[in-house]
Amino acid sequence: MGIKPELVGHTLAPTTFEIERGKIREFAAATGDSNPIYTDREAAQAAGYEDTPVPPTFGTVMGFWALGKEKQAEELGFPMAGVLHGEEEYIYLAPIYPGDKLTGNQKVVSIVEKEGKSGSMQIITLETVFTNHHGQEVLKSSQTIVIPESMDETERSDA
Amino acid sequence: MTDRKTAAARVYFEDVTEGTELPPLVNPPVNHTMLVKYAGASGDFNPLHTDPAVGQKFGLGGPIAHGMLIMGFLGHFISDYLGGSGPLKRFGVRFKSMTRHEDVITCTGVITHKYEEDGQHLIKANVFATDQTGEVKASGSFTAVLPTRS
């Protein structure tokens, strides 16, 4: 059960994702943020940005839409459901604007087996580095995923 | 490779001290529509968040909010303080407990460090997302660059 320990160091096939203005607007709205810098280029420029920037947690959009859970499931043997999100971290290296084409390289950094209150679990840390079309690293993200050992195959396939 | 300018923060380095609290952000109660909107925006379509029957089946008593929505609330809160995402250097959280429909999430924060490094003026702050009963849903910290008045 869980994913194979030898996958530590494994890098998933890189994926490229274009930053869309509408996606930034949609994401800001979904987190309740009505700051015009995320929707209006002139407001963004008045605030000192070149264009509408991406909100602080927009890296998750790149994670889901570009890297994809299906790919994680396929390449790493991740269950599609039942996993818990433990931690998320972003390191911001350079601004990200609409039209940028970002390539995400995701790597398995560590897999730790742990005994918890409700049985054993695997704690997996993934790191992703996003590079823009100028070859500049713009964002590093790190996430910790918890896979409970108790999860059985029926739960996995249903949700 | 272009060298892009990062926008200036709204607050100045001189105006903050260690212990300065950020203005809290009280979010509207979490509801089904909010979770559906967040699923579409983020691409996280796990039915635990959007299909009430699935939440029931897993014994969770109904749908639970995306952890990343709660981090998104915190991101909004930090962005309001800094004048956008530009001044951020780092932002990380740990998820502590699940959020359900009708929970009212309040974001709070306090500056813990004020320092200079490599010619930059920086602050580090702790942030918390707490519900109406005081239960912490997520906690973490961020580091940001602030402009100086001089």
Image (tube, rainbow, N blue to C red):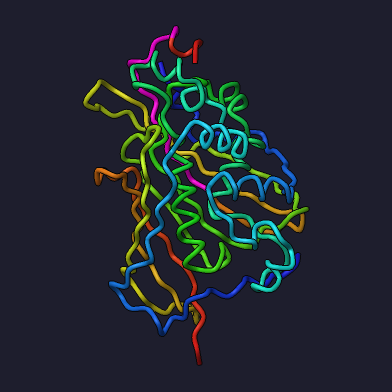
**Total numbered badges shown on the rendered structure:** 0
Report whether B120 appears left or right of B140. Answer: right
As displayed, is residue A69 above or below residue B143? above
Q: Image quadrant for the N terminus of chain A?
A: top left
At x 72%, y 42%, the residue is A17
Dividing the picture into quadrants, the one containing residue A145 is top left
Counting from the top left corner in percent of width and height, residue A131 is at 67, 52
B83 drawn magenta: no
At x 42%, y 35%, the residue is A85
Counting from the top left corner in percent of width and height, residue A94 is at 63, 63
Counting from the top left corner in percent of width and height, residue A103 is at 69, 45
Counting from the top left corner in percent of width and height, residue A25 is at 67, 50
Dividing the picture into quadrants, the one containing residue B33 is top right
| In front of the other: A129 or B42 | B42
At x 58%, y 47%, the residue is A59
At x 36%, y 39%, the residue is B103
Name of the residue lying farthest toward the top? A154
A150 drawn magenta: yes
Find the magenta span and give its range: A141-154
Report whether A10 appears left or right of B74. Answer: right
As displayed, is residue B103 above or below residue B20? above
Name of the residue lying farthest toward the bottom? B150
| In front of the other: A40 or A131 | A40
As displayed, is residue B46 above or below residue B25? above
| In front of the other: B72 or A132 | B72
Report whether B142 appears left or right of A68. Answer: left
